[in-house]
Image (spheres, rainbow, N blue to C red):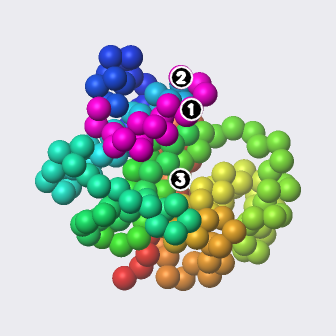
């Protein structure tokens, strides 16, 4: 986990760790706050991956698979990153992994979203206890990221996956999905 607040001079320094395409993407953000969060989150990801791979952050090669899932061009590590507000969450594993984090807040359309996207079991749990919406949502997002299939293609049978909800910080709920085996 990392905080995404940084002074302008630190953001400039961290920006140098990004690839050319990541720097271009950062420039497309309309708001400075979103640009800062992206730069800090990606630079920290590169630092963490570089430490695991024994290379400088700038040397980490990230490519994108089908549906845009990021992966290392070389290496055995699988990774996932998610951010909400000024907090980023990272997951690393030797198997496919996905993480999601959300700031706890009211969700105006929670019932409609749950009816459309939750599996039957998650929808039943949600209806029984409305406070589980973000727990269900983060599990679904983490599983979608781990599988690389996106929300529309997530496996409803999560048996090949381990799923865990947790609270990494007060006011946040998160989930981790990792392929079993």
Residue 9, placed above or below residue 147 = above
- What residue do we see at 69% from left, 55% from top? 132
In the current view of this chain or complex, which residue is farthest to the left? 54
Instruction: Give SS at disc 3.
Output: strand
Q: How packed is label 2: few (under 14 Cα within 10 Å), some, or many (20 or more)? A: few
User: Helix, strand, or loop for circle 2?
Assistant: helix
Q: Which residues are magenta?
A: 16-32
User: Residue 100's mark?
Assistant: 3
Residue that label 2 marks: 32
Q: Are marks 2 and 1 in contact (CB under 8 Å)?
A: yes
Q: Is residue 169 visible?
A: no
**Residue, disc 1:** 29
Query: Does residue 143 appear to the left or right of 111 in the view shown?
Result: left
Which residue is drawn at the image coordinates 60% and 56% (left, top)?
138
Which numbered tag is attached to residue 71?
none
The answer for how far apart the CA atoms under marks 1 and 3 are is 21 Å
Q: Secondary structure at mark 1?
A: loop
User: How many numbered badges does the structure rendering display?
Assistant: 3
Residue 63 counted in the magenta span: no
The residues bearing labels 2 and 1 have C-alpha atoms spaced at a distance of 7 Å
């Amino acid at each position: 986990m990392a905080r995404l607040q940084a002074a302008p001079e630190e953001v400039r320094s961290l920006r140098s760790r990004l690839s050319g395409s990541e720097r271009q993407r950062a420039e497309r953000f309309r708001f400075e706050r979103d640009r800062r969060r992206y730069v800090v989150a990606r630079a920290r990801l590169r630092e963490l991956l570089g430490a695991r791979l024994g290379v400088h952050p700038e040397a980490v090669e990230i490519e994108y698979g089908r549906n845009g899932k990021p992966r290392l061009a070389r290496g055995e590590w699988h990774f996932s990153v998610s951010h909400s507000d000024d907090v980023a969450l990272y997951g690393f594993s030797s198997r496919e992994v996905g993480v999601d984090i959300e700031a706890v807040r009211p969700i105006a359309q929670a019932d409609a979203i749950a009816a459309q996207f939750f599996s039957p079991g998650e929808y039943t749990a949600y209806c029984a206890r409305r406070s589980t919406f973000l727990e269900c949502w983060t599990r679904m997002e983490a599983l979608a990221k781990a599988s690389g299939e996106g929300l529309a293609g997530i496996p409803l049978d999560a048996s090949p996956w381990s799923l865990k909800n947790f609270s990494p910080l007060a006011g946040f709920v998160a989930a981790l999905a990792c392929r079993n085996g």
